[in-house]
Image (cartoon, grey):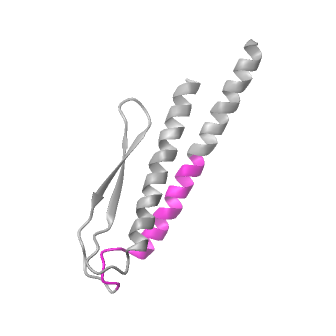
Amino acid sequence: MLISALNSGLSGMRANETALDSSAHNVANADTQGFNPQQVSFQENTNGGVIVNLSRGSAIAQQDNSGTDLENEVVQSIQYKAGFDVNAKMVKTADEMLGTLINTKA
């Protein structure tokens, strides 16, 4: 159970890191005319944990000449960071519990 929690937490951290990287990529290219921002979707892995899927959105003409919605990217970045932090706390807690279990058995 603890190992499963560690693996799930680690996959959640990786997924949120990938999503945050994608959001940063979209923001960095916001001034690129005709840029198609990446779209992020999370999916539950059959073996536990999370898989992140990246796809290309369609370029929508906006004032900034790209399909990047900066307001949306800021909100998503905050969500991805919070998701990373929650998963990091889960990994830390599982690690502490595993350490306590090992110390109890020793």
Residue under the image location 76 percent in, 19 percent down: 103
Which segment is the magenta one?
A: 64-86
| Percent position of residue 78, x then y | 53, 63
Residue under the image location 33 percent in, 60 percent down: 39
For the image shown, how many numbered marks are present on the structure? 0
64 to 17, vertically: above or below: below
Q: Quadrant of residue 47?
A: top left
For this view, does 84 lie left or right of residue 51? right
82 to 31, vertically: above or below: above
Residue under the image location 35 percent in, 74 percent down: 68
Is 73 in the magenta? yes
Residue under the image location 55 percent in, 23 percent down: 1
50 to 81, vertically: above or below: above
Does the magenta stretch mainly form a helix, a strand or a loop? helix
| Percent position of residue 38, x then y | 33, 63
- Report the quarter where the C terminus lies: top right
| Percent position of residue 64, x then y | 35, 84
Is 69 in the magenta? yes
| Percent position of residue 30, x then y | 38, 77
For this view, does 75 lie left or right of residue 26? right
Residue furthest bottom in the image: 63
Residue furthest top in the image: 105
